[in-house]
Image: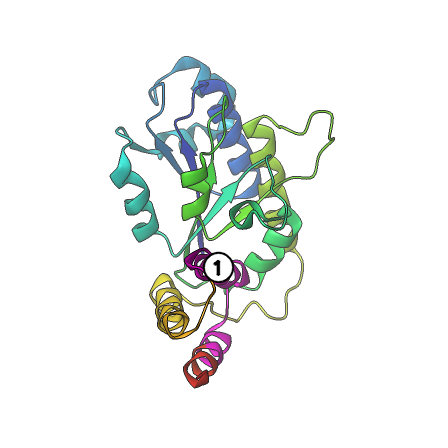
Amino acid sequence: MQLSIILIEPEHPGNTGAICRAMKNFGFEKLLLIAPKFSKENDELRNRAKWANDIVDKIKIIKKYDSKTLKKLRKDFDYLVATTAKIGRDYNIPRSPITPEQFAERLCEINKKSKIKIGLLIGRESSGLTNEEIAIADFTVTIPASKEYGTMNISHATTIILYEIFKKQSEDNLISHITPISAREKEQILKILEQQLKKMYFATEEKRETQRLVWKKLVGKGILSKREAYALMGFLKKIK
């Protein structure tokens, strides 16, 4: 499994440096910056990273951010996971989140030697992720916090998520041999689902779209094993 931290339009180099330091603390190395407001040589970035400047040196940067960028991310990663402090109610499917601990549990079920690529999307310091960015992700992670002030600094939030993953992976795990499905197999499930949805009666197209979105998020959140995936595909094909 390969986990990459993806910062979208980061604004403050100090926060990125702190994230590099947290990545070093918990054994993560892959950091992608999309349209950052600073360069890798920024003094504040490197001073805050301290002993994690080797992480800074390996940062990958996409300088331009446009409509094609999200499509490329979707293609490059098997799973995209959005982070947000703004959660929705049950009817707001894209913003229906899991906790960092639940996220870590799902990752811990993945064989560490598998080539599954997971991207953790971190939004801007000033405004977080957009609805479009959250919608393209497979599911959303949020950190429970005080209702009076629930928005965390991106470096603090990233540190908590990485800590939960590290903690869970450090425990003995008897099911770490399981290999989850890739993006290709995930798309195959959604293709079969789409074929079945077209055959079904819905009072409105909005209701059909709601079902489509719910199933997309369920398949993403589940990080299904190959056995589970093929069982689901077989079941969906039998629906008349």
Q: Is residue 205 magenta?
A: yes
Question: Picture quarter containing residue 181?
Answer: bottom left
Q: Is residue 168 magenta?
A: no
Where are the magenta residues, as a range? 204-232
- Judged from the image, the secondary structure of the residue bearing numbered disc 1 is helix
In the foreground, 196 or 1:
196
> What count of labels does the image hold?
1
Q: Main secondary structure of the magenta part?
A: helix
Q: Report x, y in % for residue 69.
A: 29, 39
Question: Picture quarter containing residue 132?
Answer: top left
Q: Report x, y in % for residue 213.
A: 46, 57
Q: Report x, y in % for residue 118.
A: 43, 52
Please indicate whether residue 146 sits to the left or right of residue 194 in the image: right
The N terminus: image quadrant: bottom left
Q: Which residue is mark 1?
A: 207
In the foreground, 15 or 193:
193
10 Å crowding of disc 1: few (<14), some (14-19), many (20+):
few
Q: Is residue 181 visible?
A: yes
